Image (tube, helix red, strand yellow):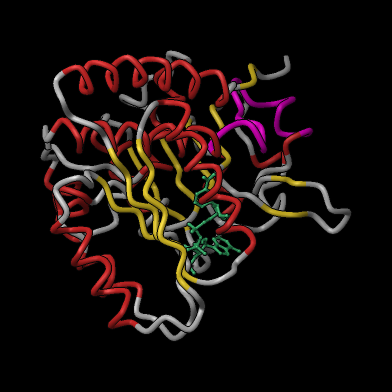
Amino acid sequence: MAATIIDGKKVAAEIKEGLKKEVEELKAKGINPALAVVLVGENPASKKYVANKERTCEALGIKSVGHKLPESTTQEELIRLVDDLNADPGVHGILVQLPLPKHMNEKEVMHRIAPEKDVDGFGPDSLGRLVLDEPGFIPCTPHGAIKMLEAYGIDPAGKKAVVVGRSVIVGKPLALLLLRRNATVTICHSKTPDLRGECLSADILCVAVGRAEMIKGDWVKEGAAVIDIGINVREDGKLVGDVEFERAKERAGWITPVPGGAGPMTIAMLMYNTVQAAKGSL
Ligand code: NDP
């Protein structure tokens, strides 16, 4: 039986609808939620992501404060901007679009963002809180993945979850969130010897690698929930995920499409974090 397609666009729209109301309530109390969006250089994908984030802010009534800096910006200049934004009471969230140009030290920038404005959740305070199961900003893409599972009634408790990819922005935090929800979690990476076997054992299979269709359809366990986070341009120019969608959907119970799955959810959860920051509730 073909899988239920997890409609990330629809789940994201529902979340954004709720946030829009929360923004109105905040404004009625005199709080004008604002997100600073910092883009350094001319990376076309980054430019597109930033434009998308700014558009979504506008649609929800969140003020977006854009800072577009040239490729030649120095580390010191960027740090100075982050310090200014940290000190600005009119800015609730700070997002520095990654990747930064090669001459910059991303880690130092992430460490510099004030914990109460770290809406991407990549700073040490946010990530530490995630490990400690304390309230804090959760990185947006893994949070979106969890929200999609929730929206389709897929409870990780007692299930075997496999996360392919161990990046700080997706794989690791997603594994922690699944663990928090009582899944038995395996994290796979480029040194995992039997990736196919690991994938086949998963009731919940989450993939964040960045290689077009590397997880084959017949690596998916019958009835599994598949969350595909990858965004890749295939040789023929088509946008595809890390999972071979057409074949995987014949075996899976649920599967996210690319595009229309993890992507829209990531932006929705960024807006969620921004509203939380404006509420000062973290
Ligand atoms: P990274 O490149 O930081 O991490 C990739 C991970 O995949 C690494 O842990 C790496 O292992 C692992 N990996 C690479 N090759 C293999 C292999 N052959 N077998 C098993 N594991 C492998 O990527 P990100 O986590 O930043 O992103 C992953 C994908 O998700 C990308 O396509 C990206 O575009 C997409 N993405 C989508 C978002 C969205 O909004 N939808 C947001 C963020 C990312 P090792 O650690 O051993 O090198």
Residue extending farthest right? 236
Residue 24's spot in the image, x, y percent? 29, 17
Q: In which quarter of the image is the C terminus?
A: top left
Left or right: 50 as drawn, with respect to 220: left
Q: In this view, does 282 lie above or below 24?
A: below
Q: Residue at x 50, y 75 (%)?
A: 70
Q: Residue at x 49, y 30 (%)?
A: 203
When asked about the image quadrant of residue 218, the answer is top right
Q: Where is residue 126 in the image (x, y as percent from the top left)?
A: 19, 51
Q: In this view, does 51 lie above or below 123?
A: above
Q: Residue 199 or 137: which is nearer the viewer?
A: 137
Question: Residue 279 location, x and y as percent?
Answer: 15, 30
The answer to which quarter of the image holds residue 151 is top left
Residue for point 43% across, 13% down: 153
Image position of 93 (left or right of 68) = left
* Quadrant holding the N terminus: top right
Q: Nearer the viewer, residue 204 or 278?
A: 278
Q: Where are the magenta residues, as a range?
A: 246-262
Residue at left offset 20%, top offset 64%: 84
Characterize the magenta stretch by its predominant secondary structure: loop
Q: How many numbered tags mark residues here? A: 0
Residue in front for this viewpoint, 279 or 165? 279
Give above or below for 150 relative to 135. Answer: above
Q: In this view, does 225 lie above or below 175?
A: above
161 inside magenta stretch: no
